[in-house]
Amino acid sequence: MTGGLRFLVAEGNPSDRNAALEAFGGRTGSECFAGLLRELEPNSTVDTAHPADVDADLPAGMALSGYDGVLISGSGLNIPDGEDDPQVQRQITFAQAVFEAGVPMFGSCWGLQVAAAAAGGRVQTSPFGGEMGLARKIALTNDGRAHPLYEGKAQAFDAPAIHVDEVTHMPPGSVVLAANRLCAIQAASIRHRGGIFWGVQYHPEFNLLDMARLVRRYARRLVDQGYFSDMAAAESHAMQLTTLDDNPARRDLAWLLGIDDDVLDRRIRWREISNWIARLVRPAAHR
């Protein structure tokens, strides 16, 4: 089988949060995933669902079993203290349904948290304060070095990231694949009710322009949290990210920001997703 895969991308944010991001020129998480899927798999069909919103049904005539792969994007929502939030619970229920349908699933950040919660794991506020901009020195575990999610990936790398929560207790049937100093579960594989999920806490789907837009979107909060000295510093950082995104050959700026090809080269940055397609989605679709 060489093409024709059908993907469903589940948007992690409700519509009001996406509208606030779009006001800063940002792409939604589902748009980021849809764009890279169309580049990696030009013959594929990519649909989008919005399980956070009320009455957000699948495209007409489609069931979960009609898809070869499901991806869950990031979100500004929180599972800690979200036990009574319908926007959170609808997404956990959605992930449980994907597990039960046996469709290969991938998620970044919120997607990993939702899948872990759906399978019985626990998500809590990041004990070391979360990460913003880049997750540094992510290192593969022994299991990660042997896992097909990381085939062809360096054993240590940086990646775009923004999170204040993380998975702290993995569910049964799961394996931790990567970690760093600030986050003990940067990647995991989860088997649950006949389904398989591979996911990461960071954002391989984000480029530097996406990160710049998020800096602008959350600038006031980031200043208050101490990531930047003031609003001008936040804007300066966003401008540097935008400039480097426009011109990756600016090695001076890459050096200043501490950004290497593991972030600048999208084929390296997307490796986990291309491996998920090649090693999990396509074989399942073939069967």
Image: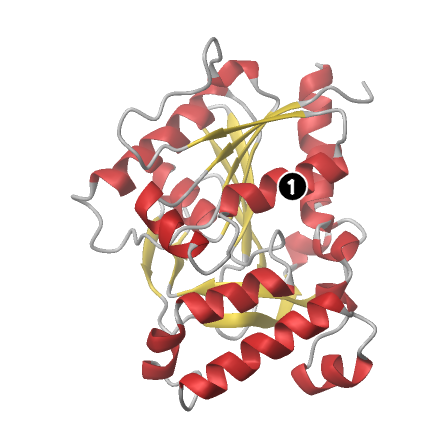
Kindly identify which residue carries mark 1: 35
Q: Circle 1 — which element?
A: helix
User: In this orientation, which residue lies closer to the viewer: 156 or 264?
Assistant: 264
- Tell me: residue 25, above or below residue 247: above
User: In this orientation, which residue lies closer to the viewer: 214 or 186?
Assistant: 214
Q: Residue furthest top?
A: 61
Based on the displayed image, in which of its 4 quarters is residue 12 positioned? top left
User: In this orientation, which residue lies closer to the viewer: 225 or 101?
Assistant: 225
Q: Residue furthest left?
A: 84
Q: How is the image coloured?
A: secondary structure
Q: Residues within 10 Å of mark 1 (few under 14, many from 20)?
A: few
Q: Position of residue 266 (x, y in %)?
A: 74, 55
On-image quarter of the C terminus: top right
The residue shown at (68%, 81%) is 258
Task: Tell me the amino acid under the disc marked 1.
Answer: Gly
- Tell me: residue 248, above or below residue 54: below
Based on the displayed image, in which of its 4 quarters is residue 96 positioned? top left
The residue shown at (58%, 46%) is 32
- Counting labels gives 1
Q: Is residue 181 visible?
A: yes
The residue shown at (22%, 49%) is 82
Residue 162 left/right relative to 96: right
Residue 270 left/right relative to 199: right
Q: Position of residue 221 (x, y in %)?
A: 33, 74
On-image quarter of the N terminus: top right
Residue 57 left/right relative to 209: left
Q: Position of residue 232 (x, y in %)?
A: 46, 87
Q: Is residue 183 visible?
A: no
Based on the displayed image, in which of its 4 quarters is residue 192 positioned? top left
Q: Residue furthest bottom?
A: 229
Q: Position of residue 203 (x, y in %)?
A: 57, 56
